[in-house]
Amino acid sequence: MKKNKLKESETLELKKSTSELKEGIISVVAILNKHQKGKLYFGVKNNGDVFGQEITENTLRKISKTISDNIEPRIYPKIEKKIIDDKDCILVSFSGQNLPYFAYNRAYKRVADEDKKISQKELEKMFVQKNKLSWENQINKSCSLKDISDDKLKKYVKKAGLNYTTKKEVLEKLELINKGVTNSAVILFSKKPELFFKLLNLRCATFLGVDTGSEPLDMTDYYGDLFELIEFAEKYILQHINVGMKLKGLERVDVPEINKDAFREAIINAFCHRDYSIPQEINLAVFKDRVEIRNPGKLYGNITINDIINKNVSKRRNPLIADIFHKIHYVEKWGTGINKILSLEPKTKFEEFANFFQVVFKRSVSKNAPVNAPVNAPVKLSELQNNILNKILKNPHITYDELSTDLKIYRTTVMRNISKLKNMKIIKRVGSDKAGYWETKK
């Protein structure tokens, strides 16, 4: 059945086949930078004649991967098979607000039905506009001033050496409110950030071997504001790597196998520079031979790993959050964090893959030391399991929901660790879920 003939425009690009995939990707970026959404057809000539496209099971996968690998920031297009004039074609529907977009390390814009390179001056203007409209500056319509914690804000203001007047005035001085509470204010100072954002939390795991296919010794999800999550991540690493000791005069000093300042710097960088528009947790994984800290979003602004290591180049994806961290000396203005990490742990590796940036610390595990546990740990329980056990000892009638609230972890995480404690015969449930209680092994 004949359909109306397609015609190229500022939001529609036509390609004869996927042999022109690179040119098609450039058109996608050009359209995004001009209109933030558009469509791309493969199997249709630029004059609108339907040519058809051979489609195998790998064709759509190849298009998806090529787009993922060569467009920055990442987009999530819809790629589907379409039949036009009884011929197989491919339709790529795309959209994105995270301007400017780059294809093969260059920025383009759509002019009529052509793709033009964006000049450096125009690109600079786009970055200025982006900083004004970035995720961290967007108004969160679900959050109001009453959802912001006075205690958290006062604690921060005191640490930053500022004066506390009113909640609103402090947020205005920190540029966290503008005709409404911004996303940054929510993840930094709200009472319960998890009520407004899902998957912007911390996911930790410890594995017996050297990959995720090995037996997991512990899996724990944490939620809270950025400052709380940073502290959770630091404590988790210390709980699951080997910690020795040395004497400094008459004082005993703990010595982790990975320098504490190095991995703390990596943790802070992960929360400071991650792409918050991607609904994905920050992942922390402890393996037998290494510790990985992974955050959503590759390096920002078209810089490379070589740039951050050898040229000391740094571009901030979230300048507002970075300034908040800088005021309490969490980060430095000029991106010295990578050099600091390498000076303390020279074997550290920095990696990019898919849409993640990852820091990898090599472990120096002693053959005689237990794997993934402090050398002085008498019981092979995780820190979370010990915390749950202590809560139960204090209150045998405590519920899953109360444990979740007190420990600031998801209810499913509580249930999973309770199950482990039951399997180890450390605790057992006596009576019903509502009227029963926990009995602990002496």
Image (tube, rainbow, N blue to C red):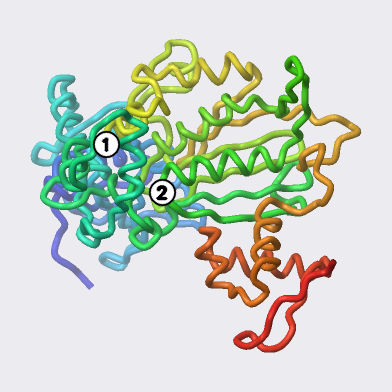
What's the mark number on residue 225?
2
- The residue at the point 55 percent across, 20 percent down is 341
Which element is circle 1 on? loop
Residue type marked 1: Tyr
Q: Quadrant of residue 142?
A: bottom left
**Earlier-in-chain disc, 2 versus 1:** 1
329 relative to 87, above or below: above
Q: Nearer the viewer, residue 390 or 346?
A: 390
In this figure, which residue is indicated by the disc labeled 1? 101
- Expressed as whole percent of the image width and height from the top left, the position of residue 421 reads 76, 66
Q: Residues within 10 Å of mark 2 (few under 14, many from 20)?
A: many
Residue type marked 2: Asp
- Expressed as whole percent of the image width and height from the top left, the position of residue 255 reads 72, 26
Q: Is residue 37 visible?
A: no
What's the mark number on residue 28?
none
Question: Count the marks: how many?
Answer: 2
Q: Nearer the viewer, residue 389 or 303?
A: 389
- The residue at the point 86 percent across, 35 percent down is 369
Which element is circle 2 on? loop
- Expressed as whole percent of the image width and height from the top left, the position of residue 322 reads 33, 31
